[in-house]
Image (spheres, helix red, strand yellow):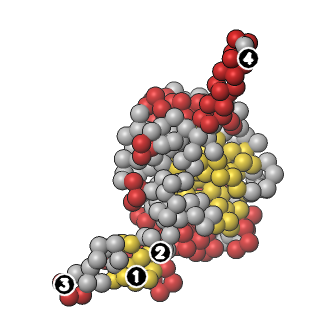
Amino acid sequence: MKSEERFALSRKEQEAMLTMMPQLLKYDLGTGVMAFSTTRHGGASIGNYADFNINHYCGDDEEAIARNKKQLCQLLQIDERRLVYPHQTHETKMVCVDEEFLTLNDTERQQKLEGVDAIATNLPGVCIGVSTADCIPILLYDRKQHVGAAVHAGWRGTVARIAEQTVRRLTDVYDCEPWDLRAVIGPGISLESFEVGDEVWQAFADAIFDMAAISRLYPVVSTGYTDGDGSPSEKWHIDLPGCNRRQLLKAGLLAGNIIDSGICTYQRYDDFFSARRLGIRSGRIFTAIMLS
């Protein structure tokens, strides 16, 4: 009986360990590459960070982050120093992870990754990615040059055309051809859910976006505004995934090479983090690519 109890306890421990493993949404970009977004499931974080978060800049417990990173690296079968992601600031800077980067100490790495919203590599066994919670994550893969990139496109980065700029940089640095690139538009806020103020709409208009194609007026339902009290009865919504898809096409990608996850983080906040639903002090999705 005691032997059976010991066996049962061991099984429970094994099951507990399995529930701690991050559950990933994977994308098929072909052979020689792994691409994924993390979900909220399978980690050590709690509350609005539950379960899985590895972002250091959103207020989560550092011990939980460390445990989550360890579990992800075990799943990917890589050393933790080969898991690389930047501190994003809604700009358009891109950093390339090369052999020299891997020799940097932690302080030097942090300096190199500060203010970076796009990251690229041609090294196998290095997982690079970006963090989002309503913003649009984009993955790019060139199967000929064997190059991967991850892009963080919030509304400011989208206005600054970070997707287009990243494609151009991949062409300059790695000799990529846009028509050879495959792309993933990961989980992010949808047109229906991304209500914005007039100043955000104007920022897109000033940047010469096709506003008829990327924006739409929706009734303001959540706050109960009406025309009678002087508040707007409608507000603008922007199609962030659509904006970035248009940028990729303009940059030369083929329509058939762009995968859209079609996942709205605001609507599916139980599975994917949404800052609009949970507040900014909540977890972040990690969307990443790793070459083999």
The residue closer to the viewer here, 225 or 211, is: 225
| Residue for badge 3 | 230
Amino acid type of the residue that numbered disc 4 sits on in the rendered structure: Glu
Q: CB of mark 1 within 8 Å of CB of mark 2?
A: yes
Q: Nearer the viewer, mark 4 or mark 2?
A: 4
Task: Give percent across and percent down for residue 167.
Answer: 61, 62
Mark 1 or mark 2: name the one nearer the start of the chain: 2
Query: How many neighbours does mark 4 have within 10 angstroms: few (below 14), some (14-19), or many (20 or more)?
Result: few
Compared across the picture, whether 14 is left or right of 107 comes to right
Distance CA(mark 1)–CA(mark 3) = 17 Å
Q: Nearer the viewer, mark 4 or mark 1?
A: 4
Query: How many neighbours does mark 3 have within 10 angstroms: few (below 14), some (14-19), or many (20 or more)?
Result: few
Distance CA(mark 1)–CA(mark 2) = 8 Å
Location of residue 195 (image quadrant): bottom left
| Residue for badge 4 | 4
- Against 102, is 234 above or below? below
Circle 1 — which element? strand
Circle 4 — which element? helix
Distance CA(mark 4)–CA(mark 3) = 72 Å
Q: Residue furthest front?
A: 1
Task: Give percent across and percent down for residue 289.
Answer: 66, 48
Mark 4 or mark 2: name the one nearer the start of the chain: 4
Residue 192 badge: 2
Amino acid type of the residue that numbered disc 3 sits on in the rendered structure: Gly
| Residue for badge 1 | 218
